[in-house]
Amino acid sequence: MRLKKLECRNFRNIESEILVPCGTMNVICGENAQGKTNFLEAIWLFTGAKSFRGAKDSEFIRLGKEKADISIEFIFQEIEQTAKIEIKEKRYAYLNEKKLKSAHELAGTFNAVIFSPSDLKTVSEGPSNRRKFLDTAIGQIYPAYIETLKNYARAVTQRNRIIKDLRYDSTVSVMLDIFEEEIVKNGIKIINARKKYTEEINKFLENIYLGISSGKEMLDTDYISCAGENFSEKLKNARKEDMYSGITSIGPHRDDLEFRINGINARSFASQGQKRSVALSLKLAEAEVIKKKTGESPCFLLDDVMSELDPQRQNYILNRIEGIQAFITCCDPLNIKNLTGGKTFSIKEGKII
């Protein structure tokens, strides 16, 4: 996977710019609030996923303009391709000039991995952050998984709406049977996909983390499911408790991913430096899984993370990630002083200078 050209028009604070990167390390440098991250965000949207900054589509459009346009030229599996996203009230996507039903259909066509300061939450904060990591990563290589997630969430929402009525009307149990069947059917698919993906990243995590920690520590991870065996039976048994809380207490929306450094839970006992290393290792392992599945490395996007890393880890990022086209945003040129190759772009007020 290689991005040949990115063109942005009226996207965020970018009026009209073209970025032509090299095939290795690309550093996007500039002071805060100049638009560095906007270029990464534009690239990321071609994965078919939502903004990694949590932005709404309307926030992508430059102030005072009616729409935004972003387009790319890229090579995937030795074939030159084009993609375009037009943003009005929502996103409209085109692949090789053919309009897609939705921007989500770009998933699996253009692959990227994003690492930003917020990814530290994957290690240090609650389970929802780890579930989001799994679901976003799996959705890139198995686009059908996204629809399974939607179907599951819809069934859980419906069950939550009627479960409280069970206290007053036992006849609603018939409706619960229907929605619980849907929850179990899609939930098992989600659990199996997450477990399989966890096994895949574990094949790479140990060596990656050993490299980042200079061979001092070992990292592994496990997927923790609350459903386990007899998912359907557990869901029915939880009805009494759930009708008072008004939520569905059993299912993959309650599951977690556990990281261990030398066998010790990283969320509870790791230092900040170790947590950063775990988050970075996780993203590099994600890139390796994509490469294994598609035969090509994804684009690697790193947003404002160099200042968060010590010199040893900075050097690892700049010079030891091989075979991947990478894009890094950076405020302080000193953080990239050890870069031995690649290309640097300076950004000011949304312009490449």
Image: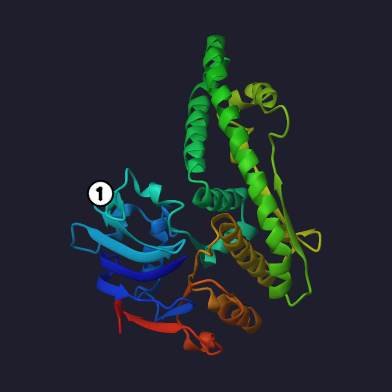
Pinpoint residue 136: horizontal percent, then vertical percent. Answer: 52, 51
In which quarter of the view is residue 167 placed?
Answer: top right
Left or right relative to 216: residue 294: left
Identify which amino acid the numbered label 1 is placed on: Glu
Q: Residue at x 58, y 82 (%)?
A: 319
Pinpoint residue 218: horizontal percent, then vertical percent. Answer: 77, 66
Pinpoint residue 91: horizontal percent, then vertical percent. Answer: 30, 51
**Residue furthest front in the image:** 78
Q: Residue at x 68, y 28 (%)?
A: 231
- Tell me, yes or no, if residue 168 can be seen here: no
- Is 348 above or below relative to 122? below
In which quarter of the view is residue 166 placed?
Answer: top right
- Tell me, yes or no, if residue 76 can be seen here: yes
Name the quadrant of the C terminus: bottom left
Question: Disc 1 on helix, strand or loop?
Answer: loop
Q: Residues within 10 Å of mark 1 (few under 14, many from 20)?
A: few
Q: Quickly name the residue at label 1.
A: 89
Pinpoint residue 350: horizontal percent, then vertical percent. Answer: 30, 75
**Residue furthest right in the image:** 263
Q: How many marks?
A: 1
- Is 262 above or below relative to 214? above
Left or right relative to 301: residue 224: right
Q: Residue at x 58, y 28 (%)?
A: 185
Colour setting: rainbow
